[in-house]
Amino acid sequence: MNCEKTSSSSDILFYLNITGDMDMESMKRFVFLSLATSITISFCLFTSTNVFAQEEELVLEEITVTARKRVENLQDVGMSVSALSAADLDIRFDADLQNLENASPNVVIDDIQQGPGSPAAISIRGVGTTDVEKNFDPTVGVVVDGVFIGVNSGMMLKAIDLQSVEILRGPQGTLFGRNSIGGVINVARQKPNFDGFSGSAVVGAGNYGHVQADVFLNFTLSEKFAFRLGGAIRQNDGWFYNRTLGRDVGEMEYSIISPSFTWRPTENLEIYYRYDQTSQDQDANTLLNMAQPDQAFCFYYGQCAESLTVPQSGDRYVVLQNDDPPYQTYFDTKTHIINAAWDINNSYDMVFVFGDFSTDEEVLQDWDATPLTLYHTDRPATWDQQSYELRLNYTGERLSYTAGLYYWDSDYHIDLVSYIGFYDLFQIPPTPPGTIGTVPVPQSVSQTTKSSAIFIEGDYRLTDNWTLTLGGRYTKDKKTSAVVDPSMPELEEHGGPDDPFNESWSEFTPKLGIRYQVNEDLMLYGLYSKGFRAGGFNGRPGTFQYLSAAIPYDPETVDNFELGMKSEWLDGRMRFNASIFHMDYKDKQEEQSVYTGVGTGQETIVVNAGQATIRGLEIDFNWLASEVFTLNGNLGLLDAEFDELVDPVTETDLSYLELRRAPDLTATIEPVLSFDVGNGVLIARAAWHYVDDMEMTFMNSPQTHVPAHSTIDASLIYTINRFSVSLWGLNLTDDDSWTQGYDVGAGVGIPGFWSYTAVRPPKTYGINLSYNF
């Protein structure tokens, strides 16, 4: 290869100049050109600095994962997994899980900004959900220290005290069970160790009033008992200006305290316990009105967006919401985790995991995003879940397996009151705006879920090169839903707290895999896996129409067929993993806000409306080009389309619509430099992440469409002895794409009342000082 004739960054700039405003195909070609150029430059750097490899053997660090609930080398796992180690996380400066979307192909993670608790919309391979309500089960499981977090509003974890993160793509129905139909984000936090007294302290500051402080201390009290105590705070002033109130808004204060211990009463038994208590206070949601001329809030009240891409305020970081009634928002959580591991003998070990996760919140929100009081809500809600898992692991000469029992119990209650200021629209004929005034509409619901499962997954080594994987999980769910409304005496007969609506479902999710170890550096695999998302009841029914609360929707399923390879090259200096997949999506649940004309004027219903086919390609690579230079990256291609989609109200064929949060292409390029400077080490990292255009709403409304966009995160860290000084920046491209979009009361031929959106945080940057001892 002649490096002097290779495309460079100037070639890319020239390509941009001659193309001008690129269309999607041109942008995709640019992405591939950038990817190829980066790899080529890295190869040139590698060959020009090969002298270092001659002086000292260079190999990538081995990555171990627990994707199958036992410790394995990443390269030995016959499934699609991306992993970040503690060293990787130390140079990323992620704010929360949202920043992790650049760590894996075909992943979209958004903070939908619908109140405190940072409700998450996570989509993997085009499989995701987007609603704030806790009755809508997630499609991607977030697992923390072995405990599944069962609600979207508790899933957007702050990037505090993390040890490792694994992103498992595709259905994980065997070992993780229900509601992991798209995949799993498996998070492990730092645990107490037996290395004596140690700790870390970090203080930092940044733009928009960002302040952070983290302190974690480790105490080894004996050879059998280690204790860890820590806490952290995060504060910022927000990045929005409220023109109606004449002040900046979006302020957030977050704190966490986390005591934990590890106890080894015998040589073969270890018990780990961790308690987390978090508190988050912040301004209410900062949404933007995108009502178009054919939507009621525009043509009737004059509250119109400036265009399809510009909100009513004229700026994506200027909001118009009022504070009537005065806003009070908080989101508090408590978590208890117990993990007991017993090494029975050389072949058997047993693990017990208990988790208790509860949330308490008060959220007053302005959803209409206008200076008027058209649609506000008061949303006090509680959530409590307990889970119990018992696993038996066996490791033999040819056979190894994990078998277990699982039980889940959760309770959810919300006393929702909506303040409706557009009741004049329901009059015949409509009365002038503001004639009737604001009407409170109560919508109180209590729901419970009980789920039990038995599962097994095992490997059998047929020969030295061939390994067969078989697994299955049987799950039984029972859900209840009670509507609480004293004004509806008929609920005393059925549907109230004394006799709630209820339904049960059961599902078997099998797994079949085959691995072929070509040599010590190359493994090929084939995989079939099935996942399902639980059925349920609507948790936000219309006040006068309880049909959606009474009639349950069924589970949805995904059958995943996958071929992949895990490989290492250049004597262990390059890791290149790839997979292709085909997924059949059946009984797809679709939540949609539909017009009712009574109560709140609309309600969100969920029906099993569609079937879809999703195909794709995924690539992960890491290249240790020299002692000082590493290149990481990933590429995801996705072809997602509905085979069948019927509108739940009109029964109209809607199969032409696009799946939400399913971009055709995602790509990341991440160069990392690390070299000695003086008596210390300097590490420089940058990550460029590209996401193709995608839809945000069920009806693919143009005002909520997200064009193709890219972001750049970067950090510069200098460490000397135990001290580090770090400069970091997130979204340095100042990308202002939508992270949420919602059409209220819309449907086929019905534009609805209005559409609202939420925007990505702007460019943020800061400096951190840290000390490890």
Image (spheres, helix red, strand yellow):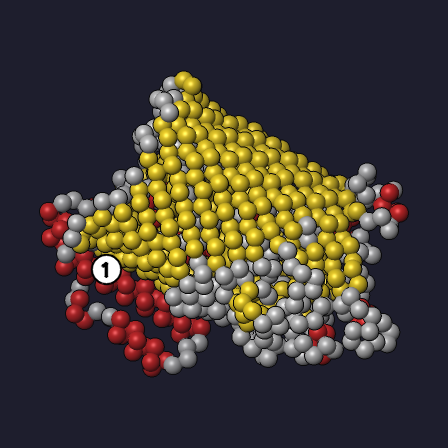
- Which quadrant would residue 327 be assigned to in this image? bottom right
Relative vertical location of residue 726 with respect to residue 240 in this rendering, above or below: above
Relative horizontal placement of residue 239, taking residue 215 as reference (left or right)? right
Which residue corresponds to the image point at 44% horizontal and 30% vertical from the top-left?
261
Locate the N terminus by quadrant: bottom left
- Image point (68%, 43%), residue name: 412
Can you give x and y, in whole percent of width and height, for residue 590 in the image?
65, 56
The reply to whether residue 505 is in sight is no
Foreground of the two, 145 or 771: 771
**Callout 1 amino acid:** Ser
* Residue under label 1: 42
The answer to whether residue 485 is above or below residue 728 is above
Percent x, y of residue 32: 35, 66
Tell me the SS state at disc 1: helix
63 or 414, which is in the foreground? 414
Q: Tell me residue 364's x, y (percent).
A: 66, 57
- Circle 1 Cα neighbour tier, 10 Å, few/some/many (<14 / 14–19 / ≥20): many
Q: From the viewer's perspective, is 726 left or right of 580?
A: left
Q: Residue at x 78, y 66 (%)?
A: 438
Q: Would residue 252 be visible to someone looking at this image?
A: yes
Indicate the quadrant where residue 5 lies.
Answer: bottom left
Quarter the C terminus occupies: top left
Residue 84: percent from left, percent from top: 37, 47
Residue 424 in the figure: left or right of residue 459:
right
Q: Is residue 605 above or below residue 693?
A: above
How many numbered tags mark residues here? 1
The residue depicted at 40 percent of the width and 74 percent of the height is 26
Toward the viewer: 26 or 166?
166
